C-alpha cells in the first residue's frame, strides 16, 4: 500500500505529526507495536497529563544544541496546544510553576489526538512490528507499505515495561544519523553506604534548592530507601553525570537561624533547632551528619559556619540512577546536528524525519516534554 508518510510510533509526537499532515491532505499511516496509542500520555501526570507548561521556552530543554528547539517551539507553542485543548472542550487547570493538567483524565488528550487524526484520515495500525526498513529510489518500505516520507517517533527507552524501546537509535544509525549517547533523565538518584544516614529516612521530604553545577531547582526533595527523589532531584538528575555531585540547600537561611538560636536559646541543641524548620527525622540525621552535640551557647563561630555550610550545601555523590525502569524520559538521542530545526527532516536523508523524545532534546519536569512532542510533531507534520 502507498502512503505519503509512514509514522513510526503512536505516542504524542507521532499522533500530532500524523494529524497535522493528514489534515493538510497527506495520506498518513501510523505504525506502533503497542496495543493502544498514547500509552505514556495515559499514565502521565498521575493520570491527568501535565500536557504543557505556560512558561515553556528554549531554556527549559537540554540538548547538544540549545538553539535547536527554538524554531519548533515558537511555531507551535504551549498556547497553540492549549487552544486545541479548549477547542475540544477539555477542562484544565494550572498547578504550580505553570504546569497545566486536565481536570478530568489523560484519556481526554489521547481521544483529542485520535479525533484530530480521524479528521485527517490517518490510518493507525497497532500491534504491528516495524521489522526491516528498506530504502530505495527515495521510497521507504515498512511493514509491507511504501511512502516517500518516514517519521521516527518511537520515543526513548524509558519505562521498557510499557513497550518503550531504543529502536529510534537503531533506525537513525542505519541511515547514518549520529546518536548522542542516551541516558536516563528525570530519574531518582541512588546513594551509597557513606550516605546511609539519609537512606534511613525513606518517605521524608522537604523543600530544597537542588544544585548540579550552575543549575538550580527550587522544589521538593524526597529521601528514599535507595537514595534521592522528588521533583527537585528528578530535575537535577537530567544534568547529573556519573561521578558528579548534587548539593541541596535544606535551610537557605541557616546562618541567621543558627546565630539567632545561639543568642536566644543558648541551652538548646542543633537537632531541636533544626526540627523547628525541617521534618524531625531529617533534623536528627542532619545533626548527626554535622556532629554538633553541644548546647548552642557553647558553640564557636567556626562550628556554626561549618553547620551552615552543610545545611546550605548538603553534598551527595550519587552512586548512580534508578535507570530506565524509573526514568520519566531519556536524555540524548538522535543528534540535532543531523536534522533541520524547522522541519525535523534529516539533512542527508531526504524524506526521513525524527521527532519527540527520540531526538536529543529533553525537557524539564513539568509538561515540557509533551510540549516538545507537540511542537516537533507539528514541525514535521507541516513539512510532510
Ligand atoms: P512516546 O514514548 O510517547 O511514544 C513512542 C511510541 O512508539 C509508543 O507508542 C511506543 O509503543 C512506540 N514504539 C516504541 N518502540 C517501538 C517499536 N520497537 N516498534 C513499534 N512501536 C514502538 N511529560 C510531560 O510533559 N508531562 C507529564 O505529565 C509527563 N508524565 C510522564 C509520566 C511518566 C510515568 C513517564 C514515563 C513519562 C512522562 N512524561 C511526561 C514524558 C512524556 O511521556 C514523553 O516525553 C512523551 O510521551 C514523548 O512522546 P513521544 O511521542 O516522543 O514518545
Image (cartoon, grey):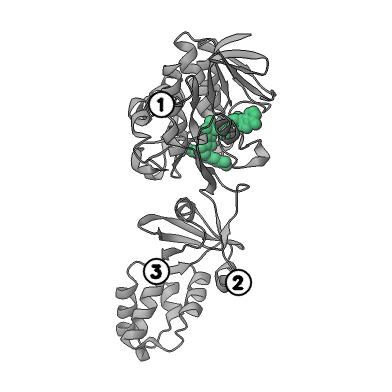
Disc number at residue 193? 2
Vertical side of 245 occupied by 114: above or below: above
Task: Say whether disc 2 or disc 3 marks the residue closer to the N-terminus.
Answer: 2
Q: Position of residue 59 (x, y in %)?
A: 34, 43
Residue nearer the viewer, 187 or 207? 187
Percent x, y of residue 41: 55, 33
Which quadrant would residue 97 be assigned to in this image?
top left
Identify the residue under disc 3: 313
Q: Earlier in the sequence, mark 1 or mark 2?
A: 1
User: Does residue 363 lie above or below 174 as drawn?
Assistant: below
Q: CA distance from mark 1 to mark 3?
A: 39 Å
Q: Is residue 72 visible?
A: yes
Q: Look at 63% across and 47% down and name the residue there.
A: 325
Task: Confirm whether residue 48 shows in the render.
Answer: no
Disc 3 is placed on an element classified as: loop
Pointer 1 residue: 81
> Which element type, helix, strand or loop, lies under badge 2?
helix
- Which residue occupies 60% across, 47% down? 324
Q: Depth-wise, is mark 1 or mark 3 nearer the camera?
A: 3
Of 348 and 209, nearer the camera is 348
In 3D space, how far apart are the residues under numbered discs 2 and 3 (Cα atoms)? 20 Å
Vertical placement of residue 141 versus 166, above or below: above
- Disc on res. 370: none
| The one of 61 and 337 positioned closer to us in this rendering | 337
Q: Is residue 169 left or right of residue 238?
A: right
Image location (x, y in percent) of residue 348: 46, 26
Badge 3 crowding class, 10 Å Cα cut-off, few under 14, some 14 to 19, many 20 or more, is some
Amino acid at each position: 500500500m502507498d502512503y505519503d508518510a509512514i509514522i513510526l510510533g503512536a505516542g504524542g509526537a507521532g499522533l500530532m505529526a500524523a494529524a497535522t499532515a493528514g489534515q493538510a491532505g497527506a495520506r498518513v499511516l501510523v505504525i506502533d507495536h503497542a496495543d493502544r496509542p498514547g500509552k505514556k500520555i495515559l499514565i502521565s501526570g498521575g493520570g491527568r497529563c501535565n500536557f504543557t507548561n505556560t512558561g515553556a521556552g528554549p531554556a527549559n530543554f537540554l540538548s547538544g544544541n540549545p538553539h535547536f528547539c527554538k524554531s519548533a517551539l515558537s511555531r507551535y507553542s504551549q498556547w497553540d496546544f492549549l487552544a486545541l485543548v479548549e477547542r475540544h472542550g477539555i477542562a484544565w487547570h494550572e498547578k504550580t510553576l505553570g504546569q497545566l493538567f486536565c481536570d478530568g483524565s489523560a484519556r481526554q488528550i489521547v481521544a483529542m489526538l485520535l479525533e484530530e487524526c480521524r479528521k485527517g484520515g490517518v490510518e493507525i495500525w497497532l500491534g504491528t512490528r516495524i521489522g526491516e526498513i528498506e530504502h530505495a529510489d527515495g521510497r521507504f518500505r515498512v511493514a509491507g507499505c511504501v511512502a516517500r516520507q518516514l517519521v521516527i517517533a518511537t520515543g526513548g527507552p524509558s519505562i521498557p515495561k510499557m513497550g518503550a524501546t531504543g529502536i529510534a537509535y537503531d533506525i537513525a544509525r542505519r541511515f547514518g544519523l549520529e546518536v548522542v549517547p542516551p541516558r536516563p533523565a528525570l530519574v531518582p538518584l541512588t546513594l551509597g553506604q557513606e550516605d546511609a544516614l539519609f537512606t534511613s529516612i525513606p518517605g521524608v521530604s522537604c523543600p530544597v534548592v537542588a544544585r548540579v553545577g550552575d543549575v538550580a531547582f527550587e522544589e521538593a526533595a524526597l529521601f528514599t530507601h535507595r537514595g534521592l527523589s522528588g521533583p527537585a532531584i528528578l530535575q537535577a538528575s537530567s544534568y547529573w553525570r556519573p561521578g558528579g555531585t548534587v548539593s541541596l540547600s535544606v535551610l537557605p537561611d541557616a546562618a541567621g537561624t543558627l546565630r539567632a538560636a545561639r543568642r536566644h536559646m543558648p541551652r538548646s541543641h542543633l537537632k531541636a533547632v533544626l526540627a523547628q524548620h525541617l521534618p524531625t527525622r531529617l533534623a536528627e540525621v542532619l545533626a548527626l551528619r554535622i556532629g554538633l552535640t553541644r548546647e548552642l551557647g557553647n558553640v564557636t563561630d567556626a562550628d556554626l559556619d561549618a553547620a551552615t555550610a552543610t545545611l546550605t550545601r548538603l553534598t551527595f555523590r550519587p552512586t548512580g540512577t534508578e535507570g530506565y525502569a524509573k526514568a520519566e524520559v531519556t536524555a540524548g538521542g538522535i543528534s540535532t546536528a543531523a536534522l533541520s530545526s524547522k522541519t525535523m527532516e534529516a539533512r542527508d536523508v531526504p524524506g526521513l524525519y525524527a521527532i519527540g523524545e527520540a531526538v536529543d532534546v529533553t525537557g524539564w519536569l513539568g509538561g515540557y516534554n509533551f510540549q516538545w512532542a507537540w511542537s516537533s510533531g507539528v514541525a514535521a507534520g507541516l513539512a510532510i
